[in-house]
Structures are given as C-alpha cells and as structure tokens.
Image (cartoon, helix red, strand yellow):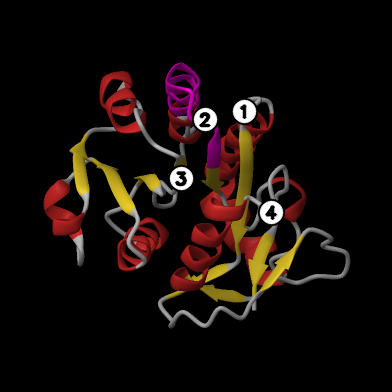
Amino acid sequence: MKLLVIGATRGIGAALAAHAVQEGHSITALVRNPEKMGRGAQDMRIIKGDILDKGSVSLAVAGQDAVCITIGIGPAFKPVTVFSEGTSVVIDAMKRESVRKLICVTGIGAGDSKGHGGFLYDSIVFPIFLRRIYEDKNIQESIVRNSSLEWLIVRPGFLTNGPVTGRYRVLTDLTGIKCGNISRGDVAHFILREMKSMSCAGQTPLLTY
C-alpha cells in the first residue's frame, strides 16, 4: 500500500510511518523538518513541506492509496486554524488526484467525545489549555465528514509511549465511558489496520484501553 503520513516526525505519525515501513508498505512523509525524522526514515520518501502549502501537499498526495493526517500543536491560547485549513488543502488535493481514503486523527474532546475525559481533564486541562485547539478540530472533523471521501476520524485517549499491544477498545457508543490511556503505537496499529480494511469508515471511534 502507498500511504502518505502528514506529521510523521513525532507522536502517532512517527509510530505509524515506522510500523508501516516494517510491514513493507511504501511510505511518503510530508514533514516541515526532515532532519527530525526518526527510525526508518531511509526507507521512506520524505517531502519537505507544510500542510498549508498546496504545492507540497499536491506533490505528496499524488499516487497514494491513502492519506493520514496526524498533525498536532502544543497548548494554544489564541484562535487556531491549522487543523481545519490544512485538512481542506489535503482534501482538495485528494480530490484532484483521485485518492479516496482519508484517516484523520483528532482526540478526546472532539465532537461527542467531549466530557468523557474525567474530571481533571474535562474541568481544568481542556478548558484552559486545549479549548482553542478543539474548536478548530471540531471544524476539521466537520470538513472531513462533508468531504465525500472514504473517511475515518480517530479520537485517541490519553497518549503514552507504551508498547504496541494490539489490545484496546474501539468505542463509538460513549455512554458511561470515561476515557483512559492508549499508546501511540497502538493508535498507529489501529490506523494501519484501517488503512487496509476501512472497516470503520464513516465513524469517529474513541480508542482507549
């Protein structure tokens, strides 16, 4: 499979790219700082660029079987637009290049997962440090939903650097759920599985142990 990972220098994106290379897939990584690429970079096609740059995005998207958006930023106290604007650029390029599969990573607090993070997260961390980010991630999710692509939105729980276990819950009904941890490796495991099957297409699952 030919897979484009946008945001592959760290976190989920880095784990996904490395795991996919190990499985023998052809990986293109669109990154702002190629020198920050970690293990397995020599086996990937690296394109230096930004999700907001139409030229580099179009170059990266061309010829792919699937695209995964895994970008992230730190806490923000001013309005954020990079998630929604960048995703629009990617979707436009995918439509031009006839690439149909899109997986977009948002997180706990997006859409109907808001309020399922536990007291500390929901009452303190989210409103103070993450509210601006998730306002834009909600717009991002809406753009993906309305894209007419074969899409999947992944909402991981609280991320750790733990091992890949392959054992986690994929939740679409959040009734009574308080989210827990999940390793970046297991999120990557789920994404790669879905890239091949898209069995959860059109859904917004929460991933947690």
Element marked by disc 1: helix
Which residue carries the number 1 mark?
Answer: 143
Query: Could you say which is closer to the camera, residue 130 or residue 53?
Result: 53
| Residue in the image at 73% along x and 55% along y | 113
Q: Where is residue 44 in the image (x, y as percent from the top left)?
A: 22, 52
Which residue carries the number 4 mark?
Answer: 199
Q: Position of residue 132 (x, y in %)?
A: 55, 41
Q: Distance between the residues labelled 2 and 3?
A: 14 Å
| Mark toward the start of the polypeptide (2 vs 3) | 3
Which residue carries the number 2 mark?
Answer: 84
Looking at the image, do the residues carrying marks 1 and 2 touch, with CB atoms under 8 Å apart?
yes
Residue 189 is labelled as: none
Q: What residue type is labelled 3?
A: Cys
Camera-near label (4 vs 1) is 4
Element marked by disc 3: strand
Q: Which amino acid does label 2 sit on?
A: Ser
The residues colored magenta run: 89-102
| Mark toward the start of the polypeptide (4 vs 2) | 2
